[in-house]
Image (cartoon, rainbow, N blue to C red):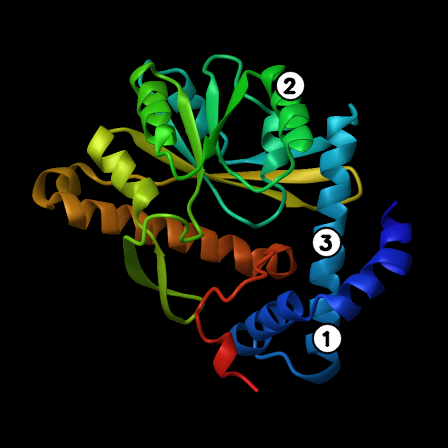
C-alpha cells in the first residue's frame, strides 16, 4: 500500500493540491532554510509520510498491530492512577489517532474532541472502534454542547483529549517564539486546564518504521511557585508556552511528520 500510494496516488495529489503544497513548502523554506532539490524532496517526503500514517490508521482500524517505543510515559501513568481528570494535548504531527486505536487507557475513559467535517459513515465507524478502547468522541460544532460534555468528563475524573496546535472556533490566543519566529497558538486547552485546575500532558505518536512508532509524552505543568504567584491568564500563557516548546522539540526530531497544510503563520499569501 505504501508503494502504491507513493507511485500512483502521491504524484496526482501533488499535481492538483497546490495550496497545501504551498503551505508546507513555506514551512521548509522559511523554518529550515531548505532550497532547490532539498526543499522539494522534503515536501515530497512530508506528503509520503502523511499517506503512510493514513494507511496505518486504516490498518489499525482493521486490526493490524504496531510496536511502540514509549518515551516519558510515566507522566501519563501517574495521572491515570489519580482520581482527578486530566487533559491530553494532541497536535497535527505524527499519528495521534493511533493512540486511541492501540494504546487507550484502561482505567479512565478518554473523551476526544473531534471537529465536524467527515462523513457520517466514517464518524460512526470511528465511534464504534474507539468505544472498544474506552474512548468516546465529542463532536465540536456551533452548538457549544461539547463544552458541557468536556466539563462533565473532567468532573467525573476522566481524560479529555484536544488538539492544541490549531486556532479553531474561539479566537483567544497567546503568543510565543516557535521555530524561530513569533507564533500564535490557541489559548483554549490551557484555559481549560487552569480554570478546571487539572493537569495536562502532551502526546506525540511518531512513525519510526513500517510497523514501529514512538509515543512521546511530555507533562505540561506549572511549578508550585508559579501556581501561587501568577495570575490566571499568566498561568494559561506559561502552560501554553511549555506545550509549544515540547511541540517544537518533536518537530526538530521529526520535521517531515508535521502535516501543516494551511497558513499557520498567516504569511504564506505574501510569498511569491
Q: Quadrant of the C terminus?
A: bottom right
Tag in front: 1 or 2: 2
Name the residue beneath numbered marker 2: 128
Quick check: marks 2 and 3 in contact, CB under 8 Å?
no
Q: Earlier in the sequence, mark 2 or mark 3?
A: 3
Question: What label does residue 224 carry, if any?
Answer: none
Gap in Å between the C-alphas at discs 2 and 3?
A: 27 Å
108 versus 16 height, above or below = above
Report the residue marked by disc 3.
49
The residue shown at (75%, 71%) is 41
* Residue 157 appears anywhere in the view: yes
Q: In x, y percent, where is residue 195?
A: 21, 34
Q: Is residue 4 left or right of residue 166?
A: right
Badge 1: few (under 14), some or many (20 or more) residues near its Cα, within 10 Å?
some
Q: Residues within 10 Å of mark 3 (few under 14, many from 20)?
A: many
Q: Answer left or right for 223 relative to 154.
A: left
Q: For residue 57, what is the image quadrant?
A: top right
Look at the numbered disc 2 and give the secondary structure of its residue.
helix
Is 38 placed above or below 86 here?
Answer: below
Q: Residue at x 31, y 18 (%)?
A: 84
- In the rendering, at what x and y percent does residue 201 appear? 40, 36
Tell me which residue sits at (59%, 27%) in the image. 100
Q: Provide the secondary structure element on which disc 1 rests.
A: helix
How far apart marks 1 and 2 lie (CA) works out to: 39 Å
Return the disc, 3 or 1, that comes first in the chain's sequence: 1
Residue receiving disc 1: 40
* Badge 3 element: helix
Amino acid at each position: 500500500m505504501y508503494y502504491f500510494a507513493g507511485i500512483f496516488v502521491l504524484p496526482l495529489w501533488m499535481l492538483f493540491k497546490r495550496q497545501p503544497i504551498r503551505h508546507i513548502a513555506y514551512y521548509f523554506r522559511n523554518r529550515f532554510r531548505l532550497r532547490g532539490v532539498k526543499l522539494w524532496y522534503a515536501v515530497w517526503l512530508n506528503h509520503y509520510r502523511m499517506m503512510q500514517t493514513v494507511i496505518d490508521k486504516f490498518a489499525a482500524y482493521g486490526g493490524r498491530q504496531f510496536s511502540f517505543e514509549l518515551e516519558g510515559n510515566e507522566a501519563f501513568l501517574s495521572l491515570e492512577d489519580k482520581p482527578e481528570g486530566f487533559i491530553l494535548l494532541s497536535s497535527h504531527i505524527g499519528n495521534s489517532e493511533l493512540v486511541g486505536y492501540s494504546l487507550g487507557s484502561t482505567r479512565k475513559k478518554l473523551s476526544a474532541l473531534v471537529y465536524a467535517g467527515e462523513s457520517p459513515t466514517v464518524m460512526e465507524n470511528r465511534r464504534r472502534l474507539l468505544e472498544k478502547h474506552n474512548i468516546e468522541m465529542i463532536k465540536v460544532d456551533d452548538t457549544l454542547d461539547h463544552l458541557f460534555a468536556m466539563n462533565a468528563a473532567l468532573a467525573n475524573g476522566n481524560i479529555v483529549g484536544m488538539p492544541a496546535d490549531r486556532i479553531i472556533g474561539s479566537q483567544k490566543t497567546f503568543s510565543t517564539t516557535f521555530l524561530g519566529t513569533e507564533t500564535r497558538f490557541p489559548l483554549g486547552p490551557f484555559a481549560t486546564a487552569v480554570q478546571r485546575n487539572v493537569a495536562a500532558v502532551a502526546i506525540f505518536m511518531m512513525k519510526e518504521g513500517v510497523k514501529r512508532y514512538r509515543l512521546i509524552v511530555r507533562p505540561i505543568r506549572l511549578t508550585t511557585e508559579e501556581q501561587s504567584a501568577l495570575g490566571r491568564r499568566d498561568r494559561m500563557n506559561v502552560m501554553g508556552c511549555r506545550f509549544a516548546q515540547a511541540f517544537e522539540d518533536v518537530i526538530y526530531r521529526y520535521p517531515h511528520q508535521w502535516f501543516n497544510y494551511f497558513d499557520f503563520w498567516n504569511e504564506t499569501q505574501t510569498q511569491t
